[in-house]
Amino acid sequence: MYDASLSSGAAPKPRGKSLLVQDARTRKRNAAEKRFRAYGMTAILIGLFFLVVLAVSIIRSGVPAFTQTVVDVEFTLTEEQYTAAEGELFKTKAYEGLLIEQIRDTLEARGLEVAFDAGAIERLLGKPGGTLREHYRANEQDLGSPVSFKLAAASRVDGYLTGRVTREALQDSRFMQASDLDLIDALVSADIITRAFNWNFITGADSGVDNPGGAGIGASVIGSFFMMLVVLALSLPIGVAASIYLEEFAPQNRFTDLIEVNISNLAAVPSIVFGILGLAVFIQFMHLPQSAPLVGGLVLTLMTLPTIIISTRASLKSVPPSIRDAALGVGASKMQAVFHHVLPLAMPGILTGTIIGLAQALGETAPLLLIGMVGFVARGYPDGVLAGFTEPNSAMPAQIYTWAARADASFYEKAWGGIIILLIFLLTMNIIAIILRRRFERRW
Amino acid sequence: MKDNHIAENEVATKNIKIAARDVQVYYGDTHAIKDVNVEIEDKTVTAFIGPSGCGKSTFLRCINRMNDTIDVCRVVGDILIDGEDIYDRKVDPVQLRAKVGMVFQKPNPFPKSIYDNVAYGPRIHGLARNKAELDDIVERALRRGAIWNEVKDRLDAPGTGLSGGQQQRLCIARAVATEPEVLLMDEPCSALDPIATAQVEELIDELRQNYSVVIVTHSMQQAARVSQKTAFFHLGNLVEFGETDKIFTAPEDPRTESYITGRIG
Ligand SMILES: Nc1ncnc2c1ncn2[C@@H]1O[C@H](COP(=O)(O)OP(=O)(O)O)[C@@H](O)[C@H]1O
Ligand SMILES: [Mg+2]
């Protein structure tokens, strides 16, 4: 052993304590550090756990809203049948009769015997005759050859297939009867019932309370989008201008202190207060249209302003004063110093604050209840809703609230689906903000 | 008062650039500068020395009205540059600062390219009519800042990526780019290593040919090396002002002597 021979005897004994042995104080400190790390990890794990639970339950409950049960029938209409049906008094009824025959034939071909009548088909599929007639009137070339129709099934069919509606619990009603369940079973074994993507949920408008299948969130996405435009266009310039003035130009005195305190207080005011303020000022006093995204946007602007002002001021404050000195030192005016040097450096922080403010505004329901942007059925959709800021509309969270409050259980599923769309909207906004922030970020 | 008479006698025949008359500075209730009278010559390096907190920076910042940016700060008395009162109501501080450049204690380049750092002043003052002229101004300023050779190949690189000494010389180049007549420097070398300090000191000596340079320093050796005139401040008073040689070899005031020999400070 080279080391040993060299150090034996000649090596000086360490003075005091050896570094190789931990003393009591060091052990205690290390233990405390380990404990703290464990606490931190636990905290993060708990957070992650809840996030996962939330994500899983949202997706599990929400995804069915994006699909729809359809009865997929291959249907052939000859020219003679077409002419005959068009000659009838109740034309759609004639088409319906042909469809029923077709379904019966299909089932018989597979050896399935069920008794059903036109009433049962109407309970399951609504009024399919109209859909058929419309198709053939528009596409006469399809006459004589088989066409595959995907006919949307009623929400109770959905419910039966997903287990929400059970045979035992079912009471015969005008919506569904026990015998209908046999028909559904037969259709399932004949592979006629499938699930298809529900475009109407994404693009459509809200439906009546008894038609959950036709409900869509599209109209309220447009409403939310218009509101966000109003909020962004008003609160960003006003908020940033106010912050710059307060932070860089305003003298420090009682008056500005008062303003400062009030802005902080405003950020803590419950949103419903802003809602009632909006109702009183914008609608009752200024006579702006009710239920309009413009009014919603104005109310949400009031709510968002304090958030933007506070975060903008914080990010202006975090720009080192030496940068202002440098600019003033070469003879820049105060405004030039702020706009050429301070503001660009504060931009990432301002954007973060703006996005947080907008995200809050996007998810806000309470003030919208008060200005009537809730429980609204878009009759003129899509024309009326698309017309813009002053046409009545709803917003995503308000729409979700409406659905969640409805009696029919299938609206519950729609509410979850709406939440997924809301989160996607939010995520898109955040991604845009991150991209913008990357652009503005500067290395020091 | 006695000190000022001596100073006046010596500089009477020379060109006075900056003259301060009974200057008082208050920070709220704090009386930071008391009755300062001083005359600073053109094309000279004047050093302000004194223990920290004695008001050197405060007085320096009066000369380009940087104190205006501090809410609580109040300046009383007159400061004349070329015989014009800079605290006159008609004077715009922005115009003044183009004429009186400043270099700060901590190098503070803008987080922009080296070129933009230097070009910023000339741009906002409209000193260049086109890109070629601006390029010229930038090159001249960087040469005067004795940093041209080090950065000429990377003018697009960020100014903040330079070493501390290079950053400070960049700031000096930025200050001279606007063609000031007076250059104020507040402890420009306190963040620099000895080699960078030597480079900056050499540069200050060169700048003397074109500008009136006022430098605050906590290093007496530095004051002795670079300045022709020295002012000693103590507790807000200008205790002694005169030829640097004289201040360091035969100070008149006992406080100056104690400071120079290391008994206060
Ligand atoms: N912004 C300010 N607000 C209030 N007091 C200040 C401010 N700047 C400096 N002072 C006070 O003025 C005095 C002189 O400071 P300063 O000029 O910075 O000294 P020096 O540069 O000589 O070290 C000190 O007592 C200091 O506390
Ligand atoms: Mg100082």
Image (cartoon, coloured by chain):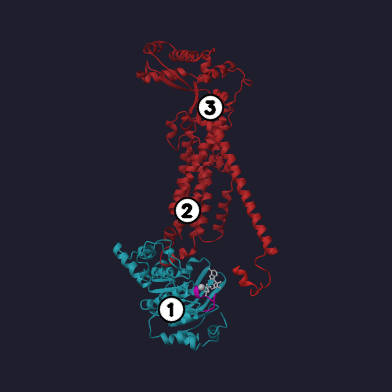
Tell me if residue A384 comes above or below residue B10 in the rendering.
above
Instruction: Specify the amino acid type for callout 3.
Output: Pro
Question: Is disc 2's CB within 8 Å of ligand 1?
Answer: no
- In the picture, the disc for residue B158 is none
Please rate how many residues cluster around mark 3, counting C-alpha atoms within 10 Å: few if below 14, some from 14 to 19, many from 20: many
Q: Are marks 3 and 2 in contact (CB under 8 Å)?
A: no
Residue A186, picture quadrant? top right
Check the rendered structure and report the hue given to chain A.
red
Q: Is residue A322 visible?
A: yes
The disc, 3 or 2, on the residue closer to the chain's N-terminal end is 3
Chain assignment, label 1: B
Do the residues indicated by labels 3 and 1 lie within the same chain of the protein?
A: no
Q: Nearer the viewer, mark 1 or mark 2?
A: 2
| Amino acid type at image mark 2 | Pro
Element under disc 3: helix
Picture coordinates of residue A152, whole percent (x, y)? 49, 23
Q: Is residue B39 above or below residue A162?
A: below
- Labels 1, 2: one chain: no
Inter-mark Cα distance, 3 to 2: 43 Å
Please state which of residues A304 and A13 is positioned toward the viewer in this rendering: A13
Residue B173: name its quadrant: bottom left
Q: On the picture, is B176 further left or further right than B234?
A: left
- Which image quadrant for residue A255? bottom right
Amino acid type of the residue tagged 1 in the rendering: Ala
> Which residue does the numbered mark 2 point to in the structure image?
A348
Mark 3 and mark 1: Cα distance apart in space: 86 Å
- Write down the region rendered in magenta: B50-57
Confirm whether the magenta stretch covers residue B14. no
| Location of mark 1 (residue) | B19
What residue did someone put label 3 on?
A212
Chain shown in cyan: B
Residue A287 point in image, percent of width and height: 49, 38
